[in-house]
């Protein structure tokens, strides 16, 4: 057993030991099973194929632990307002839900938002059959660790036919004044015919110290349900981040994921989608922008297990300085999934000689009546376009910014116009060539 694994096992064991006696037995069981799975799998290394390009050593060597009490958070009110979107929002600080900074104003009829801690206590009969069913502890070491530390997060429920026109925002802040381990779990259940937009925002709140966020989101879409999911990861320069999004789609359901990875020293974002009913449609969009020595990993997996489903996937990377970005996308078409239509693209733009991009699109096709394609590309700014702009009197830095934004624009414009797109544009502007160096605070 490595020293890093021993530290995390000790942290999780001490966390479970202080659990409330009144908690349901099944919650304790989920934690215990998560701990056992984490001990069995251990911390991954680059010798593991699935983690070949992810340097986990900063996580393994860190001394991170969850906080019991976040204390006074009043000083964060201005920061929250700067990041908040119109509509209902829930705020978490260092992994803990903070009611005083949160608001459910504008939450429409048929849509309920509940703290995970309350749901674990009061809604156990229903939640027991949902939590851990999409994100399997036995399949992923950090999902297992999240389960071992299960306590805080959110449960979003959409009743049959419910419509939420205003986005629901979950804002996760880390203060960076202590080596905190935040382990939020989000559970989304959308019943038949419902529709909503969910925005998860991960950001820092001023401190420059290292933090570790290990986030898991589980989504269950009923027949003909629709969910637009946005993930904005813009944590500080010393942050470490592992995020997993796990989705099960019912018949004729629609799911769209828009992931923007802009912050953290090391960040890995995974999206797993399983089609469980015919006629499902999934769109996966992602933009990762790195500079300095950032390492940004993107992994996606689409499981076409039933006929007549479609998926579209576009991930783009912009990498400057000595940053490194990786993309691994798997589209699996099972033998009975006839009439599948799946397209996958990954494109990377390198802005310096030392920046690196690794692309591995992958198709596994066992059916014969399908339309599937994939591709990847790594390149630099178009020299002719750059020359043209400079010949028109545009300074080099500004010309590079224009061309880089043009490369990213397709993904930015996939975000509906309004406050959310403005937030994405603001975050992106601070990462483009010529922007002031420093943190990624919007």
Image: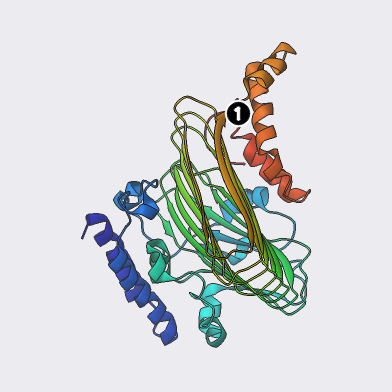
Please identify the quarter of the rendering in which residue 111 is found. bottom right
* Element on which disc 1 rests: loop
374 or 85: which is nearer to us? 374
Q: Position of residue 224 (x, y in %)?
A: 73, 73
Compared to 58, does 255 lie above or below? below
Question: Is 195 left, or right, of 288 in this rendering?
Answer: right
Looking at the image, is 376 positioned above or below residue 201? above
Q: Position of residue 199 (x, y in %)?
A: 65, 58
Query: In the rendering, at what x and y percent does residue 260 appear?
Result: 60, 47
Q: Report whether residue 287 is seen.
A: no
According to the image, label 1 marks what residue? 435
**Counting other residues with Cα less than 10 Å from the Cα at mark 1, is it few (<14), some (14-19), or many (20 or more)?**
few
407 relative position to 243: left or right: right
The residue at the point 54 percent across, 79 percent down is 130
Q: Quadrant of the C terminus?
A: top right
- Rendered residue at 72%/61% (across/down): 167
């Amino acid at each position: 057993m490595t020293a890093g694994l021993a530290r995390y096992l000790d942290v999780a064991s001490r966390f479970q030991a202080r659990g409330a006696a009144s908690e349901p037995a099944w919650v304790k069981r989920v934690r215990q099973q998560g701990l056992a799975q984490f001990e069995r799998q251990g911390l991954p290394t680059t010798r593991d194929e699935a983690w070949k390009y992810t340097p986990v050593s900063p996580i393994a060597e860190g001394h991170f632990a969850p906080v019991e009490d976040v204390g006074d958070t009043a000083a964060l009110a201005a920061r929250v307002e700067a990041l908040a979107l119109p509509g209902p929002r829930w705020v978490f600080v260092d992994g803990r839900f903070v009611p005083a900074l949160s608001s459910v104003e504008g939450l429409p009829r048929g849509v309920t938002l509940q703290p995970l801690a309350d749901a674990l206590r009061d809604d156990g009969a229903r939640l027991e059959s949902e939590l851990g069913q999409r994100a399997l502890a036995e399949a992923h070491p950090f999902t297992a660790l999240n389960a071992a530390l299960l306590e805080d997060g959110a449960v979003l429920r959409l009743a049959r036919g419910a419509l939420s026109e205003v986005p629901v925002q979950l804002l996760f802040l880390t203060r960076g004044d202590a080596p905190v381990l935040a382990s939020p779990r989000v559970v989304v259940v959308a019943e038949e015919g419902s529709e909503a937009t969910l925005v998860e925002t991960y950001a820092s709140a001023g401190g420059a110290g290292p933090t570790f966020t290990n986030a898991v989101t589980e989504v269950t879409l009923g027949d003909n349900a629709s969910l637009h999911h946005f993930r904005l990861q813009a944590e500080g320069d010393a942050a470490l981040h592992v995020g997993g999004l796990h989705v099960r789609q019912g018949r004729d359901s629609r799911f769209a994921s828009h992931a923007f990875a802009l912050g953290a020293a090391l960040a890995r974002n995974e999206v797993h989608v399983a089609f469980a009913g015919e006629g499902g449609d999934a769109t996966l969009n992602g933009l990762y922008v790195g500079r300095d020595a950032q390492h940004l990993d993107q992994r996606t997996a689409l499981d076409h297990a039933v006929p007549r489903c479609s998926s579209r996937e576009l991930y783009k990377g912009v990498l400057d300085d000595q940053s490194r970005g990786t993309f691994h996308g798997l589209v699996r078409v099972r033998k009975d999934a006839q009439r599948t239509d799946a397209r996958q693209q990954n494109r990377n733009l390198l802005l310096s000689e030392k920046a690196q991009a690794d692309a591995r699109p992958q198709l596994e096709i066992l059916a014969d009546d399908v339309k599937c394609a994939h591709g990847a590309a790594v390149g630099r700014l178009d020299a002719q376009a750059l020359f043209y702009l400079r010949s028109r009197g545009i300074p080099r830095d500004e010309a590079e910014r224009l061309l880089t934004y043009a490369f990213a624009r397709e993904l930015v414009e996939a975000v509906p116009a309004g406050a959310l797109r403005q937030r994405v544009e603001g975050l992106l502007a601070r990462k483009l060539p010529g922007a002031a160096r420093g943190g990624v605070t919007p």
